[in-house]
Each structure stands twice: as C-alpha cells, then as structure tokens.
C-alpha cells in the first residue's frame, strides 16, 4: 500500500475508534485497542489534533474535534432524504424500544460494495444489548439491512463470506434473494450472533429508487412480534417515501 494511502487509512482507523460508547481515549488505551505502537500512534494523534479533527482534553484524553461536525453537517446537508429518514428511525426506536438504524450500500475503494450503518438510534431501546450497536460496516450476508440492499441491487454476498454462527447462510442466496425481492423485507435470525436477529425494509425516493435500508436489531425472542414490527417498519418507510414525493401508481 502506498505510504500516503497507508497514512490516510491509519487516520481513518483512529477516528473510527471514537463512537457513542467510547467518546474518549488515552494514548495507551487507543494503542492497545488498535494494536499499534504508542510512538506511532502519538504522531498520528498529534497530527489529527493539530488539524482540529481531534481535541486533547483533561488527563491526557482525546475526543473528536468540532471540525468533524462541520464535515458531517456538510455531508448530511448534501443528502436530501437524510433528515426525514433520521426522524422516522428515531420514532421507530421509541415506538418499538429497539435499536433502529439507517444503512446504505456504497462502493468501496477496491471496486467492491459495502453496507454502511450511517445512523442508529440513541434513545428508545431497552432490554439487553444486541450485536451491531457500534458497527459501521455491516456483513451483507448476516445482517438484515445488508441482505436487503444486496438483494434489491442484484448482488451476491455469499461468495467467501465467513460463517458467524451455524445459521449463517443456511438458505441458498438465490432463493433468499428472490424472497426478499418479493416481500421487500429481509429477516435474519441468529445469523450474526446467536441471540440477535433483525428486520429491514427499503426506503425509496420520489421515483421509487432504493435509497437506504431502515431496520431494527432485536433479541431473537422478540421475533415472535415479527408481524407487528414489520408493520411498524413499513409504516415508517411509507411516511418517508411520501414525504420525499413518492406516489405509488
């Protein structure tokens, strides 16, 4: 990997270590988390702090800098559907008491595809934690949003995909993709981790194009509420589509 690209990749890894659960790190904590020497990491932190992407706070700890807020505001401002979808996601979380999220399909730097969780609810969830609460890149073959987006875009996530549990990729992808395309709904049951399941439906724009996936992650026993939860998901997605100007024929 060229040195410039390697440097950028390392900086991205540092920034991605900060999330809602880990808002601050010390040098030694972050070095252990990333598996990097403290001397190398110290240089990266100094550079990121000088650029305003990180801020050094009390007791030698670092947190994200305000400059990132400007960048994120510019990003979300360039995505016209994000605000209404984000509101729907939070309302869904409050109504179901589950973790709700928005995911998109994006080309990665190697020409492949990846499923990115661009927003997740902060409030509304109660009960035990579920897998995926802090993940940014989701496995397309073992997450409901990943399966939904891959199926609706005619992609196959199964080749060379790791098996996380005995239920991962239990159904041949061709058959599962056809079922997802027909129902406009993806379901996972204990496929990423035993005890965690998921549901996802598409968010569409004015012309009916798939913009993102709206989903919930839940303890597997709550799949007994699948019909009710699916109805809530579809209602939320329909409200977003209507607000964006989609009028089914």
Image (cartoon, rainbow, N blue to C red):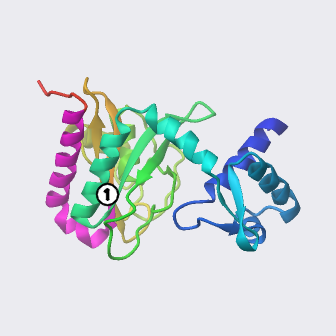
Q: Residue 125's image quarter?
A: bottom left
Residue 212 part of the magenta-drawn span: no
Question: Residue sitting at 81 percent across and 36 percent down?
Answer: 4
83 sits left or right of 110 in the view: left
Q: What segment is highlighted magenta in the picture?
A: 216-243
Which x, y percent locates residue 124? 31, 66
Q: Name the quadrant of the N terminus.
A: top right
> Looking at the image, which residue sits at the far bottom?
127
Question: Residue sitting at 48 percent across and 51 percent down?
Answer: 139
Question: Residue sitting at 37 percent across and 58 percent down?
Answer: 121
219 sits left or right of 230 in the view: right
Q: Could you say which is closer to the camera, residue 75 or residue 125? A: 75
> Looking at the image, which residue sits at the far left?
249
Q: Name the quadrant of the C terminus.
A: top left
Question: Residue sitting at 39 percent across and 39 percent down?
Answer: 150
Which x, y percent locates residue 152? 33, 35
Which x, y percent locates residue 23? 59, 65
Which x, y percent locates residue 161? 52, 49
Q: Give the crowd class for mark 1: few <14, some 14-19, many >=20 residues within 10 Å.
A: many
- Residue tagged 1: 216
Tell me the element at label 1: strand
Residue 227 part of the magenta-drawn span: yes
Relative height, residue 160 to residue 130 (above, below): above
- Of helix, strand and loop, which mostly describes the magenta segment? helix
- Could one spot residue 183 in this view of the protein? no
- Count of number-bearing discs: 1
Q: Could you say which is closer to the camera, residue 30 or residue 171? A: 30
Relative height, residue 217 to residue 7 (above, below): below
């Amino acid at each position: 990997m060229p040195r410039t690209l390697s440097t950028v990749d390392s900086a991205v890894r540092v920034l991605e270590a900060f999330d809602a659960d880990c808002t601050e790190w010390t040098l030694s904590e972050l070095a252990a988390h990333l598996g990097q020497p403290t001397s190398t990491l110290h240089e990266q932190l100094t550079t990121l702090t000088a650029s305003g992407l990180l801020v050094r706070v009390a007791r030698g700890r670092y947190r994200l800098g305000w400059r990132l807020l400007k960048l994120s505001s510019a990003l979300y401002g360039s995505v016209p559907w994000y605000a209404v979808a984000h509101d729907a996601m939070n309302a869904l979380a409050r109504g179901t008491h589950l973790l709700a999220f928005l995911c998109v399909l994006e080309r990665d730097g190697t020409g492949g595809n990846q499923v990115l969780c661009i927003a997740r609810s902060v409030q509304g969830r109660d009960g035990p934690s579920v897998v995926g609460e802090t993940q940014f890149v989701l496995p397309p073959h073992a997450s409901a949003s990943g399966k939904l987006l891959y199926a609706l875009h005619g992609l196959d996530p199964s080749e060379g995909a790791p098996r996380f549990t005995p239920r991962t990729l239990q159904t041949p992808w061709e058959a599962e993709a056809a079922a997802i395309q027909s129902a406009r709904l993806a379901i996972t049951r204990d496929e990423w981790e035993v005890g965690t399941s998921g549901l996802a439906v598409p968010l569409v724009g004015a012309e009916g194009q798939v913009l993102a996936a709206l989903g919930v992650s839940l303890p597997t026993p709550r799949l007994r509420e699948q019909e009710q939860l699916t109805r809530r998901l579809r209602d939320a997605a329909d409200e977003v589509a209507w607000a964006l100007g989609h009028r089914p024929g």
